Image: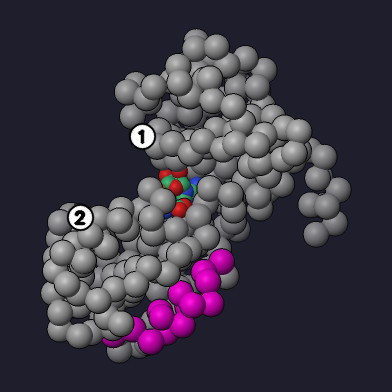
Amino acid sequence: MTVSLVGAGPGDPELITVKGLARLRACDVLVYDRLVAAELVDEAPDDALRIERDRLEQDEVNEVLVSLGRRGDEVVRLKGGDPLLFGRGGEEALALARAEVPFEIVPGVSSLASVPGSVGIPVTHRGLASAVTAFAAHDVESLDVAALARMPGTLVAYMGGARADRLARRLIEHGLPASTPAAVIVRGTLPDEQVIVSPLGAVAAAPGTPALVVIGDVVGVRALLAVRRSAA
Ligand SMILES: C[S@@+](CC[C@H](N)C(=O)[O-])C[C@H]1O[C@@H](n2cnc3c(N)ncnc32)[C@H](O)[C@@H]1O
């Protein structure tokens, strides 16, 4: 194998997979996202070349992966969460496939279920939600909010923390009750994680990044799990 697209998990460095960690410990070159845990970057061998992705445009990342892969280096492309869920891993895989560079995809623990789940919010729960809609909310104004407001089950907004208040207002304007439970989770699974639970009508912009916004009756389960959390 030459290039491994590896999911680093949602933040807590212990949430990488066993396979992902093995690839990381054996790489010659590590190309990593700014958001991945520093502890994971440290897991690469001391003499591995480390390249921070955020200094590069996406096309440049694709080119770097292709040229290192062609050289036969063991390359790990370490991405937050899962590489293929709002991670542009698909674009990188396509560039490698087109260049006929051998690659593999090592899935990661996405923030989709792990961030809400780790704070006691199951994104599905029998009797409350049997569907989940994950969507990118970096451009709240261009979202099809009418369709989102009609979706059954739980809504999970990625990249929308800074405008969570505007997202909430638009969903309410399109028919979602202002009383719908909501949670804004900032830096989930990390030591400085923050969880702000409120009705949709009172949602404010997230106080930091990265943040997920979870909307739906499943948010209410968190309060019922409070005993478990305080015992932990
Ligand atoms: C570019 S997307 C990458 C998602 C990633 N591929 C995944 O599977 O989780 C970045 C967004 O994921 C969400 N996110 C990632 N990690 C998070 C965390 N620890 N806590 C809260 N939200 C997180 C935020 O919405 C953030 O803006």
- Please provide percent x and percent y for residue 224: 82, 40
Q: Along the horizontal axis of the image, is 180 left or right of 188?
A: right
Dominant secondary-structure state across the stretch colored magenta: helix
User: Gap between marks 2 and 1, in whole Å?
Assistant: 18 Å
Q: Along the horizontal axis of the image, is 104 left or right of 59?
A: right
What amino acid is at disc 1?
His
User: Is the residue 150 above or below the residue 182 in the image?
Assistant: above
User: So how many labels did they put on this image?
Assistant: 2
User: Is the residue 206 above or below the residue 200 in the image?
Assistant: below
Q: Residue at x 79, y 52 (%)?
A: 229
Residue 127 visible in rendering: yes
Q: Is residue 18 inside the magenta stretch?
A: yes
Q: Which residue is mark 2?
A: 58
Q: Residue at x 58, y 49 (%)?
A: 113
What amino acid is at disc 2?
Gln
Q: Secondary structure at mark 2?
A: helix
Q: Are marks 2 and 1 in contact (CB under 8 Å)?
A: no
Report crowding for label 1: few under 14, some 14 to 19, many 20 or more residues within 10 A (C-alpha).
some
In the rendered structure, which segment of residues is drawn in magenta?
A: 15-28
Q: Along the horizontal axis of the image, is 53 left or right of 226?
A: left
> Which numbered circle lies on residue 138?
1
